[in-house]
Amino acid sequence: MKLYFYSIGKAHDSYIKPGVEDFTARINKYFPAEWQVIAPPKNAAVLSEGDLKKQEAKLVLNLLQPDDQLILLDERGKQFSSPELAQVIQQKANDSTKRLIFLIGGAFGVDASIQQRANTTWSLSKLVFPHMLVRLILAEQVYRACTILRNEKYHHM
């Protein structure tokens, strides 16, 4: 199984990039993993919120393959403990998932078409975080889940 981290927005900020790269390199010891930062449409500033979400959805949907498993990060999703996230990832691997995709939507969230396409909607917290920070939290939590699956010492209960 390969893990993909899709994020709509600009490239990683300089204060986030080293952490995201470090945790992604660590994840690669368990599963191949890569980031794809999806630039918003060039005319984003002149689009309505709804039209922007529709344009972003087209960009994301064009990247997805029919059998991809999509985990959408959204504040209205289900919250998981770290061990529960590990179980979700293990179950996807057990199901012979080829591509597990974690998606961080745009500034206004995602279009209904993405919500409908998502296999799982996951909330990191009831709090709202800046998108750049979500990238770092996501990478760290997926790494933590990998160490849980291998009974390694990183995660302490």
Image (cartoon, rainbow, N blue to C red):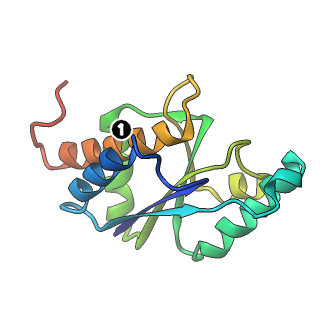
In the depicted view, which residue is nearer to us: 103 or 98? 103
- The quadrant of the image that shows the C terminus is top left
> At x 50% / y 42%, what residue is drawn?
132
The one nearer the camera, 68 or 8, is 8
Res 127 → quadrant: top right
Q: Amino acid at mark 1?
A: Glu
Relative to 75, 124 lies left or right: left
Q: Position of residue 118 (x, y in %)?
A: 62, 56
Query: Farthest residue toward the front?
Result: 14
Res 81 → quadrant: top left
Find disc 1 in the rendering and name its residue: 84
Rendering coords of residue 99 (x, y %): 44, 70
Dot 1: element: helix
Q: How many marks?
A: 1
Quadrant for residue 66, please give it.
bottom right
Tell me if 75 is positioned left or right of 108 in this view: left
Q: Looking at the picture, does residue 97 appear above or below residue 140?
A: below
